[in-house]
Image (tube, rainbow, N blue to C red):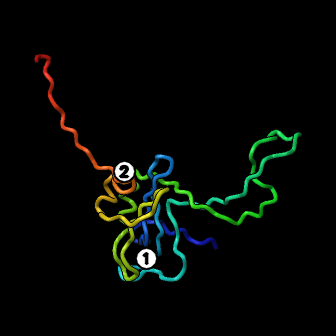
Amino acid sequence: MPKKEIPVNEKNYWAQEVFRVLVNGQGHIGALVRRKYDETDVEKRGLGMYIGIKEVEVKDMITDNDPESETFGKRIPDPNDEGGRKKMQFVETDDKEALAKYKKLTGTTNYGTTILTYKFREQTFEAPDSEEFWTADIKTIHRKYVQKLPELEIPSIPRSGKK
């Protein structure tokens, strides 16, 4: 008998860690979740499950040296590579609906409190402000914490045609 799929929602799962990332100028969100049976009982065994993130197998690349091949001189996956290495790829964008969905999965349980994490190419760090994590644009966060650029508000100055 096939295993019944349990829907990912706040009744069935708790987010141990939520990630907001900036990949190629696009904001994404994902989480490590654990099975939740009630408010005081979260599954401690096992690695948990990632949502909004998929594993992609990584193969070494080589230059095709076969002159008969259509890909001659181009980079192709090494056919002799055993693989086995995996990379995590974020698949869910951090729009308002996704942020609301992930926020419902957070909280404090017997296992601990949800960790809110920003991941950028330059650094990974825990969110200093939990409310800002759910409301601010990821590019603004990058400018504020990674590039450390101040937020400037430029007042509009009315201009008249007369001097």
Distance between the Cα atoms at labels 1 and 2? 36 Å
Secondary structure of the residue carrying tag 2 is helix
* Residue type indicated by callout 1: Lys
Q: For residue 115, which numbered disc appears in the image?
A: none
Q: Residue at x 52, y 74 (%)?
A: 48
Q: Residue at x 15, y 24 (%)?
A: 159
Q: Which residue is mark 2?
A: 143
Q: Earlier in the sequence, mark 1 or mark 2?
A: 1
* Residue type indicated by callout 2: Arg
In-image side of 69 versus 55 (left or right): right
Q: Residue at x 36, y 79 (%)?
A: 109
Q: Quadrant of the N terminus?
A: bottom right
Q: Residue furthest left?
A: 163
Classify 10 Å Cα crowding around label 1: few (below 14), some (14-19), many (20 and above): many
* Depicted 68 relative to depicted 81: above or below: above
Q: For residue 36, which numbered disc appears in the image?
A: 1
* Depicted 98 relative to depicted 115: above or below: above
Observer-nearest of 4 and 138? 138
